[in-house]
């Protein structure tokens, strides 16, 4: 009766509503597995991007997007949602600029995935803890 309950979920609104209905005072967390699953998918898509953003520019699109996705993962691991959202916005800007220069499906597909992930993180930011600290303290961060 006096035990603290923790709910780990995929961040879906339906599941969250059930959790809040069952136990509103419980600790509600976003499952780390679901975050990394989305990031891994976007990283794999980014590996298929063209190397350069423009013909005359020497900005390496693929490398920059991959680096920024890794930074996003690091910020989320440490519970810094504000910085993660800033980095995701930077990625979106880079991808949108690249899609204006090249009409490639890979770029627009990844841009859409990053936009959806940005919205997902924004809606679930209250449920993103400092995973690194929880992991170090032996607390659960994932259902797997």
Image (spheres, rainbow, N blue to C red):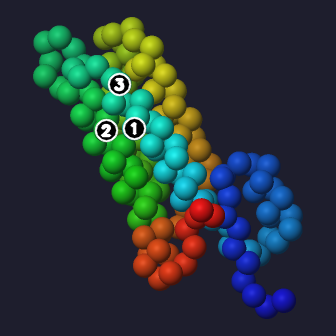
Say which quarter of the image contains residue 6. Answer: bottom right
Q: Which mark is residue 48?
A: 3
- Residue under pointer 2: 66
- Give the answer, above or below, for where 13 lies relative to 138: above
* 26 with respect to 141 (left or right): right
Q: Position of residue 113 (x, y in %)?
A: 51, 31
Element under disc 1: helix
SS of the residue under disc 3: loop
Distance from disc 1 to disc 3, alpha carbons, whole Å, reads: 9 Å
**Residue behind mark 1:** 43
Query: Which tag, 2 or 1, sits closer to the chain's start?
Result: 1
Dot 3 or dot 2, earlier in sequence: 3
Taking the spot 61% from the left edge, 53% from the top edge, the residue there is 124
Quarter of the image that includes the N terminus: bottom right
Tell me if residue 61 comes above or below residue 16 in the rendering.
above
Q: Residues at badges 2 and 1 in contact (C-beta under 8 Å)?
A: yes
Q: For residue 31, which quarter of the picture?
A: bottom right
Label 3 with label 2: CB-CB less than 8 Å: no
């Amino acid at each position: 009766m006096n035990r603290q309950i923790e709910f780990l979920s995929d961040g879906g609104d339906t599941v969250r509503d059930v959790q809040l209905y069952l136990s509103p005072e419980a600790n509600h967390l976003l499952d780390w597995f679901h975050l990394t699953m989305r990031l891994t998918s976007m990283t794999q898509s980014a590996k298929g991007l063209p190397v350069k953003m423009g013909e005359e520019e020497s900005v390496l699109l693929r490398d920059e997007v991959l680096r920024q996705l890794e930074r996003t993962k690091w910020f989320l691991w440490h519970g810094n949602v504000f910085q993660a959202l800033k980095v995701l916005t930077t990625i979106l800007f880079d991808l949108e600029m690249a899609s204006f220069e090249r009409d490639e499906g890979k770029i627009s597909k990844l841009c859409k995935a990053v936009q959806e992930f940005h919205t997902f993180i924004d809606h679930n930011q209250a449920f993103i803890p400092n995973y690194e600290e929880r992991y170090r303290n032996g607390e659960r961060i994932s259902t797997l």
